[in-house]
């Protein structure tokens, strides 16, 4: 079984937060003020997070995209009334597949 490195998405806690929502997309422009519609933004996956300020992917978010590439991750704060902040946006390269094994090897006396 190949070794696949997990990724930790984290953020600082916000005083008075009831929870957070984490969004992911390959398209940075969806997080622009005029395009972002929170959970109704087309082409964006989201996950509500309560009681913690981190996600380990893919363990804590099985739906996180598995195709290798740069992904934009946005985090919002949600209050008790359901109001949600503007997103904090970051990006990183994600890959959850291992490279192939060597095709040939050997052991010899020297």
Image (cartoon, grey):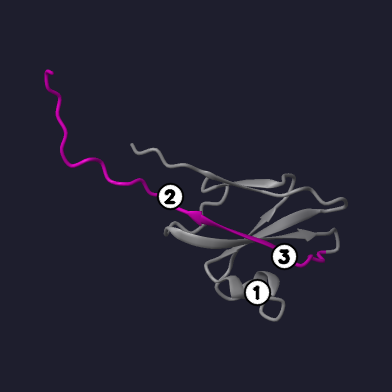
Q: Residue 66: where, in percent of width, then height?
A: 44, 56
User: Which span of residues is magenta-colored?
Assistant: 82-110
User: Magenta: predominant secondary structure element?
Assistant: loop
Q: Earlier in the sequence, mark 3 or mark 1?
A: 1
Question: Pointer 3: residues within 10 angstroms few (<14), some, or many (20+)?
Answer: some
Mark 3 → mark 1, Cα distance in angstroms: 14 Å
Task: Identify the mark at residue 96; answer none if there is no mark.
Answer: 2
Instruction: Tell me, for residue 87, which label it has, or none.
Output: 3
- Mark-to-mark CA distance, 1 and 2: 27 Å
Q: Is residue 17 left or right of residue 28?
A: right
Q: Mark 2: few, some, or many residues within 10 Å (few <14, many ≥20)?
A: some
Secondary structure state at the residue bearing disc 2: loop
Q: Are marks 1 and 2 in contact (CB under 8 Å)?
A: no
- The residue singled out by tag 1 in the image is 40
- As drawn, is 14 to the left or to the right of 57? right
Between disc 3 and disc 1, the foreground one is 3
Q: Give the residue at x 54% y 48%.
A: 57
Q: Is residue 40 left or right of residue 85?
A: left
């Amino acid at each position: 079984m190949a070794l696949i490195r997990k990724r930790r998405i984290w953020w600082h806690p916000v005083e008075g937060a009831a929870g957070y929502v984490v969004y992911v997309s390959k398209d940075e422009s969806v997080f622009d003020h005029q395009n972002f519609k929170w959970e109704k933004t087309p082409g964006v996956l989201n996950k509500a997070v309560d009681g913690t300020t981190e996600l380990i992917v893919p363990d804590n978010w099985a739906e996180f995209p598995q195709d290798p590439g740069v992904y934009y991750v946005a985090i919002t704060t949600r209050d008790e009334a359901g109001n949600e902040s503007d997103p904090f946006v970051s990006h990183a390269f994600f890959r959850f597949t291992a490279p192939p094994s060597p095709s040939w090897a050997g052991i010899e006396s020297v």
